[in-house]
Image: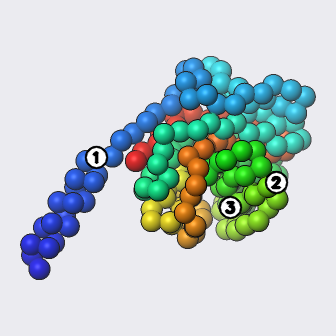
Amino acid sequence: MRKTLIIIALSAITFAGNAQTFSETFDSNTMGWTEEASSRGEAVVKDGVLHLVSKGTEMMSSCYTNLDVKKNFEIKCKVNVKKIDDGNPIGIIFNYLDDYNYCLFGIDEEMAYFKEIRDGQLVGWRRNALKLKGKRKVELDFAIKSTYNRVQFEVNNMTAIELRFKPLVSNGIGFYIVGNQTADFDNLEIIQ
């Protein structure tokens, strides 16, 4: 029994020691983030952040990573929101295939959301109460943790939503806003 516990402990230490971290500081567009500037808003890498502005509609920026979605991983980033728009989410995208097939964890001033979009249609949805302090100049820490088909969304180091999920199929990630909002995403870390 004692030998078994020692082997398990050593295995855990070995796994933790093998974790690799990729960091994106948005000093340049090294990951190939999609960029757009139009009457709908903008999604551009500038001034060391991924800057998203939506003008009454949704805006997103995405890229593909070297993440192996069949293994455990964590995605973390910092978000600075100028003003949270009532009822309109700001969030982080994962399992991104294209603009019509992805999963989203998002928040507004009162709720945390999970949405699964397939062929442009909402096919999965869950929400949970979440109270933010203030709506103007809000600083947030977002994190997605995937462990053995369990996906967890954290906001400011608190679990906002946790769910069991079918196996992920894409290493695409992104950021998302809707409504009349401005947000800067920075210090992206992908840990595996």
Instruction: Kindly identify the residue that appears in the image at 74 percent across and 39 percent down.
Output: 60
Instruction: Kindly identify the residue that appears in the image at 43 percent across and 36 percent down.
Output: 22
Instruction: Kindly identify the residue that appears in the image at 50 percent across and 53 percent down.
Output: 69
* Residue 185 visible from this viewpoint: yes
How far from the left and from the top, in percent, is residue 45? 65, 24
Which residue bears the numbered disc 3?
114
Instruction: Kindly identify the residue that appears in the image at 51 percent across and 31 percent down.
Output: 24
Residue 167 placement: quadrant: bottom right
- Numbered label tally: 3
Q: CA distance from mark 1 to mark 3?
A: 30 Å
Instruction: Please tell me which residue lies in front, 27 or 61.
Output: 61
Label 2 or label 1, whichever lies nearer to me, is 2
Label 1 or label 3, whichever lies nearer to me, is 1
**On screen, 8 above or below 100?**
below
Image-based side of 20 in relation to 148, left or right:
left
**On screen, 182 above or below 19?**
above
Which residue bears the numbered disc 2?
120
**Mark 3: few/some/many CA within 10 Å (<14, 14-19, 20+):** many
Secondary element type, mark 3:
strand
Which residue type carries mark 2?
Gly
Label pair 1/3, CB-CB below 8 angstroms: no
Secondary element type, mark 2:
loop
* Residue 108 visible from this viewpoint: no
Quarter placement of the N terminus = bottom left
Which residue bears the numbered disc 1?
18
**Mark 2: few/some/many CA within 10 Å (<14, 14-19, 20+):** few
Instruction: Please tell me which residue lies in front, 61 or 160.
Output: 61
